[in-house]
Image (cartoon, rainbow, N blue to C red):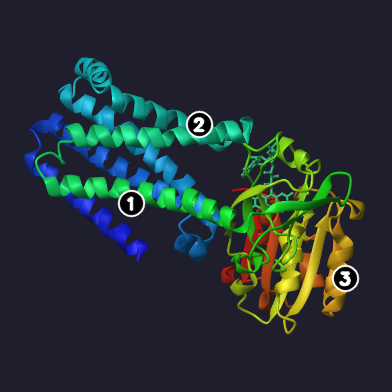
Amino acid sequence: MLVVLAGLNLGAVTALALAGLATAGPGAAGLLTWAGRGAGLFAEVLIVAQVLLAARIPALERAVGQDTLMRWHRGLGQSTLAVVLAHPLLLAAGYGGAQVGGFLSQSWTLATTYLTATGGFLLVVVTATLSVRTARRRLKYETWYAVHLTTYLAILLAFGHQLAVGHDLAGSPLIALWWKGQLVAAAGCLLLFRIGLPLARSLRHRLRVVSVVAESDDVASVYLTGRHLDRLPAQGGQFLVWRFLHRRGWWQAHPYSLSAAPSGDVLRITVRAVGDGTRQLARMTPGTRVIFEGPYGIFTADARTRSRVLLIGAGVGITPIRALLEELPRSVDVVLLHRASDPSDAVLVDETRALVNARGARAWMVSGPRGQSADPDRPLGPNHVRALVPDVARRDVYLCGPPGFCAATIEVLRQLAVPDNQIHHESFEL
Ligand SMILES: Cc1cc2nc3c(=O)[nH]c(=O)nc-3n(C[C@H](O)[C@H](O)[C@H](O)COP(=O)(O)OP(=O)(O)OC[C@H]3O[C@@H](n4cnc5c(N)ncnc54)[C@H](O)[C@@H]3O)c2cc1C
């Protein structure tokens, strides 16, 4: 339904842009102006699509999972930036009569005449530039996120500009209504699913920390309880975005997977300290209140297509795998590969082993240095996986760990002829 609506919207915008050709001025300048106006229309549609992809719409999230939605959101960002850049540049070229001098003076005139649009344009450019992977890695997550939020202001400024001066929207109340409808739909989804639903769930379940248990020097499990947890639609393998309301970090929200299947009255996460947000968790006191978003993710027992399953967890990526071990039906034949740089570094080893034994499954601890060599005999390389799990191609494979590990292991699974629809993965990066 959503895909059909998006397709219809795109078709209608294309028709509107093409209709503008009929009234385009003569020559190259007329064509450039027409293309600039079209770019403005498409820029807005792409921005609305990006907002919708990031709005945590439950139907979309259930269909493809949040990591895929975020990948599409990021991918669309590049096209959006290109079209946003093209809009004023093409208009300046068209208004300037396709002359270099005219282009420069028209650029200045446009930038200083349409100040709100210029503000929105600059905000989008800054955010998109900072979202490029290399720039993004240098920023603290919270700084990048705060900058990213300013795009909502940019969208409002750009919409206002379009409705006030948009050539293709002027003169038709129906088209202007449709245009406003897009903004209302995007804003409505954001308010409903990113603010309303999380607040309602947080108020309903009133989660609080019961205890924090050290699993090792740098890993801790946080146990949480609340009201009506049996009605929280959470499954083993899913993650939530948690905001712990303690003095040192209430402004940060971080995604963590459930490290045990929800029991109806207790939830648990297990976290490795890698930065300020994760380090503070180990020092939380019982009673700390929690606001959360989610549960999210399609990395669940429901994704299974076969009666045999291979689970692969690397590092702290064992957490959702551990929860899945509990939730997969007993009839399922399970093999577990637990990857760690060193066995002493592995997380939740004893309880994972107990679950494996209880269901008569098989498990191997695979250790060795991190990083991916090209050696086919490397730990979890093709030869190694084939030797441990000869029937791997006939299994669903659930895989969780750092992004580099997941990408390399998916490659290995494809070499071993595991079909893509049998590979389910969660990488600890959105
Ligand atoms: C779906 C998912 C499930 C996860 N589950 C677990 C888990 O069960 N156990 C566990 O130990 N870790 C898990 N992580 C990783 C965990 O979210 C990060 O380690 C944590 O957010 C780092 O925060 P920090 O402030 O300590 O570190 P920082 O030094 O601030 O960041 C370290 C890395 O984490 C990323 N990061 C920081 N904050 C966020 C955020 N709010 N959202 C997304 N990425 C962020 C940063 O971009 C950076 O790459 C999960 C991540 C994802 C995406």
Residue shown at the point (72%, 45%) measured from the top left: 288
Residue at image mark 3: 354
At numbered mark 1, what does the secondary structure look like: helix, strand or loop? helix
Residue at image mark 2: 147
Residue at image mark 1: 185
On the picture, is 31 further left or further right than 347? left
Cβ–Cβ under 8 Å for marks 3 and 1: no
- Name the N-terminal-most of marks 3 and 2: 2
Position of residue 320 measured from the top left corner of the image (x, y, whole percent): 71, 61
- Does any atom of ligand 1 lie closer than 8 Å to the CB of label 2? no
User: Is 138 drawn above or below residue 61 in the view shown?
Assistant: above
The answer to whether residue 296 is seen in the rendering is yes
Q: How many marks?
A: 3
- Name the N-terminal-most of marks 3 and 1: 1
Q: How many C-alpha atoms fall within 10 Å of the one at disc 1: few (<14), some, or many (≥20)?
A: some
* Image quarter in which the N terminus is found: bottom left
Residue shown at the point (18%, 44%) measured from the top left: 176
User: Which amino acid type corresponds to the residue marked 2 in the rendered image?
Assistant: Val
User: Which amino acid type corresponds to the residue marked 3 in the rendered image?
Assistant: Ala
Which residue ends up furthest to the bottom in the rendered image? 331
Marks 1 and 2 sit apart, C-alpha to C-alpha, by 23 Å
Between residue 8 and residue 23, name the one nearer to us: 8
Between residue 68 and residue 245, name the one nearer to us: 245
Position of residue 73 measured from the top left corner of the image (x, y, whole percent): 46, 48
User: Which amino acid type corresponds to the residue marked 1 in the rendered image?
Assistant: Ala
Residue 319, picture quadrant: bottom right
- Name the N-terminal-most of marks 1 and 2: 2
The answer to whether residue 128 is seen in the rendering is no
Residue shown at the point (8%, 33%) measured from the top left: 25
Marks 3 and 1 sit apart, C-alpha to C-alpha, by 49 Å
